[in-house]
Image (cartoon, rainbow, N blue to C red):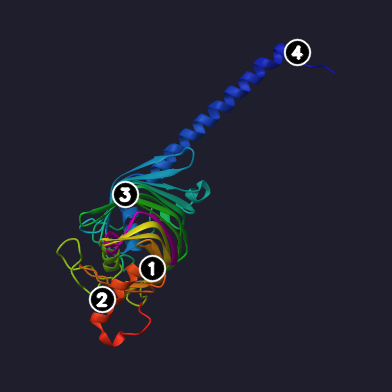
Amino acid sequence: MMFMSRPAILPELKKILIAGAVVAVVGALGLFVWARSVFTGDTVRVAVAGQLGKALGQPVAIGSLGVTIWPRVTMTLHDVTIGEPARITAKELFVGTEFRALLSRRIEHAVLRMTGARIVLPLPALGGADASGPGRGSAPGKPPVDLVSVDAISVTDVEIVSGRRTLHGDVDLRPHGSSVEIRRAAFGADATTLTLTGEISNLDGPVGDLALNATGLNFDELLKFVTDFAASAGIGGGRAPASGGTPAPRAPANAGVPMNLSVSISADRATLGALVLDKLSGRARITADGLRLDPVRFGVFGGTTEGAIAFTLADTPAFRLKASLAALPEFLRAPFVALAHRANPSSAGRNHQ
């Protein structure tokens, strides 16, 4: 049997490699051109904005579109605004999709990544009827690209504004039908850091079970954020929000699902007005009636107490504290007991709380 010599094989192998590289380059160039034809242009930009507006129930505007094919086919939306006036903005929104779905002009199992986002509370009513508005939706007929499903959402460098209060952070979400898993949401402001995880089982309320770990938790600031968020969820009763002078937007689409969030809270240190609380832990429930911590346990004045705290959601939040003073030293318990007795003389001899 005759074998080609090694010097003869090398030129043939070189030709094969060069031919393979040329095919790969041409294929990549063709894919890029085809992807641009699918993902870019005013028709696609208007269609995508219309689909997003229909899903969110608020008008969506997109400044421009771009596309990349490596390492995954990704559409980039620049200068995105949601609402009129815009309450949610993003410098860039990256939409990665599967190549096979793209062949059918569908975006399936998409991964959304948003950067440079700014959210102003209270939010507009989301999830209502199609609010894409004239000129924003796609033309009648089949859209040039169809957004079918989203597997993951990440938001980096987000800024949440409520009046003069601002939080900065990152968010990692996993949608599951009508629910969403909060894998991690980390926020910071001044000396406070917040880390939130859990599951929102119903976005309409919203309804869910969450866990909040905090460092330097400021209840006064937290309540103001919660109050504005409550107005966004349509439970603010039409009152004027804490930030701004216009009435809080309503959310008629959510009216049938009341807000009900259960949140386990753990903080190394918390402040409530001038009162400093150490090693606070408990479970909070946020509803249309307000925020209630029950049970709650914290250290105060060198002792430990437990009980319940109820807050109202208003421009000037009020609270009621019911807690056992048995763990406090006698010299610290006496002023509280005397104060309770002056307020209610019939309480003498009872087990004061």
Amino acid on which the number 3 mark rests in the picture: Ala
Lower sequence index among marks 1 and 2 = 1
Lower sequence index among marks 1 and 4 = 4
Taking the image as drawn, is residue 311 in sight? no
* Camera-side mark, 3 or 2: 2
Badge count: 4
Task: Please determine whether, in this image, residue 160 is positioned above or below residue 251.
Answer: above
Pick the residue in front: 293 or 272: 272
Q: Is residue 216 magenta?
A: yes
Q: Which residues are magenta?
A: 209-223
Taking the image as drawn, is residue 255 in sight? yes
**Are the residues at dot 2 and dot 4 in contact (C-beta closer than 8 Å)?**
no
Crowding near pointer 4: few (<14 within 10 Å), some, many (20+)? few
Rounded to the nearest angstrom, the CA distance separating label 4 from label 3 is 74 Å
Which residue was labeled with disc 4?
A: 5
Return the mark for residue 191.
3
Q: Quadrant of the N terminus?
A: top right
Q: Quadrant of residue 351?
A: bottom left
Lower sequence index among marks 2 and 4 = 4
Residue 40, image x, y percentages: 35, 44
Which residue was labeled with disc 1?
A: 328
Task: Please determine whether, in this image, residue 327 is positioned above or below residue 166.
Answer: below
**Are the residues at dot 3 and dot 2 in contact (C-beta closer than 8 Å)?**
no
Element carrying mark 1: loop
Which residue was labeled with disc 2?
A: 339
